[in-house]
Image: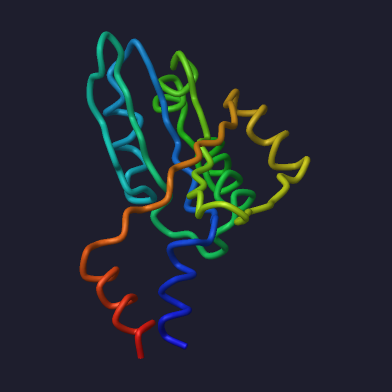
């Protein structure tokens, strides 16, 4: 049974998370600093000629794309005017839904609610999807799987 669970983890296409990615001509530190207690900051700095922030929600109770995007939208709508200005001035605001591809014959399905799409539009954000290739298994996990299958 344990082998099957380990094997499924590497072959199942699955939803990972939603990242919020912001590109701006202005420094994004003031925006992120104001709400960072609600976020995991993955990146905050300069990329090429733009400022970039890539963040995830820190506390997610229902880990679905709908719940996470709506959580971000709620946070953005509550921003004070001084911080909301940085959001409004950004060149792009993207809710990026991450999917990990598990391999041939594997799938992942979800639908975004109309309310979620409307909320993203209300804060002038796009919704994107990134599909990541399957994780490479470590040599140790491959060895354990081979050993277990020989028993």
Q: Nearer the viewer, residue 146 or 46?
A: 146
Q: Residue at x 38, y 82 (%)?
A: 149
How is the rendered protein coloured?
rainbow
* Quadrant housing residue 64: bottom right
* Quadrant housing residue 55: top left
Picture coordinates of residue 145, whole percent (x, y):
34, 76
Picture coordinates of residue 84, whole percent (x, y):
46, 26
Furthest toward the front, the residue is 150
Picture coordinates of residue 23, whole percent (x, y):
39, 20
Q: Is residue 85 left or right of residue 137?
A: right
Q: Residue at x 41, y 26 (%)?
A: 22
Furthest toward the right, the residue is 114
Picture coordinates of residue 87, whole percent (x, y):
45, 23
Q: Is residue 121 left or right of residue 79?
A: right
Q: Residue at x 63, y 54 (%)?
A: 107
Q: Nearer the viewer, residue 94 or 136?
A: 136
């Amino acid at each position: 049974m344990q082998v099957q669970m380990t094997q499924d983890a590497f072959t199942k296409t699955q939803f990972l998370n939603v990242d919020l990615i912001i590109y701006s001509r202005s420094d994004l530190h003031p925006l992120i600093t104001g709400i960072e207690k609600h976020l995991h900051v993955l990146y905050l700095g300069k990329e090429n000629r733009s400022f970039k922030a890539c963040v995830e929600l820190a506390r997610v109770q229902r880990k679905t794309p709908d719940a996470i995007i709506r959580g971000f939208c709620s946070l953005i709508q509550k921003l004070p005017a001084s911080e909301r200005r940085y959001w409004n001035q950004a060149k792009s605001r993207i809710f990026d839904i991450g999917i990990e591809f598990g391999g041939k014959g594997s799938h992942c399905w979800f639908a975004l609610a109309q309310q979620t799409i409307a909320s993203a539009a209300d804060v002038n954000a796009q919704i994107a999807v990134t599909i990541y290739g399957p994780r490479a298994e470590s040599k140790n996990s491959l060895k354990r799987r081979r050993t277990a299958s020989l028993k």
